[in-house]
Amino acid sequence: MKPREYFDELLEPIAGNLYNFLRKYATNDFDCDIIFQSTIMRAYKKFDQFTPGTNFKAWIFKIAYRVFLNYTRSKKQLPKLVYGSNVDDIDLHTPDTLQDLENDEVEIDENVDFNELYNLLTKKQQEIIYYYYAKSMKYKEIAKELNIPIGTVMSRLNRAKAQIRKQTRN
């Protein structure tokens, strides 16, 4: 049997359960559909890593949960605009697009220069902010990449966020 046919054979009886599982986590149908489709695509691409005879359902549900976490984290990186904000003032393609994690909103003031805020950070803080937001890396991945302890990554990130919050409130 070809891998595609085998994948379809394993997926068909559990597809509804997988969708319902994701629906419990996703906040709306649109997000659920995106996560479901991404899960199927990722599972198919990595199907060569699945060991035949093992629990396919557990394997694909684990992939689904990780896709959900990554999707949720990527959505949180985009600042929510407050009514009256100027969208043209935000560059969503640079690591200096930061959010206020206390309330998950950034009130955009047309006088705020995000590049200026980013440049107020130390080089080490900028590096952590870049890897965390622009590269969507996890603490552990950043620590490995920079060859520093995970606690250092977390503290630098928190200090950088605190400094940015302080500057935007002034």
Image: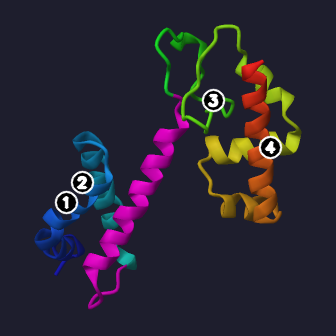
Pointer 2 or 4: first along the chain? 2
| Residue linked to disc 1 | 20
| Residue linked to disc 4 | 159
Rate crowding at label 4 as few (under 14), some (14 to 19) or many (20 or more) other CA atoms within 10 Å. few
Q: Quadrant of residue 168?
A: top right
Q: Is residue 159 above or below residue 96?
A: below
Which SS class for mark 1?
A: helix
Q: Amino acid at mark 3?
A: Thr
Pointer 4 or 1: first along the chain? 1
Q: CA distance from mark 4 to mark 1?
A: 39 Å
Q: CA distance from mark 2 to mark 1?
A: 5 Å
Q: Amino acid at mark 4?
A: Arg
The quarter of the image holding the N terminus is: bottom left
Q: Position of residue 38 (x, y in %)?
A: 33, 53
Q: Quadrant of residue 49?
A: bottom left
> Residue at image x 44%, y 48%?
72
Q: Amino acid at mark 2?
A: Arg
Q: Which mark is residue 23?
A: 2
> Residue at image x 63%, y 29%?
97
Which SS class for mark 2?
A: helix
Q: Is residue 17 left or right of residue 114?
A: left
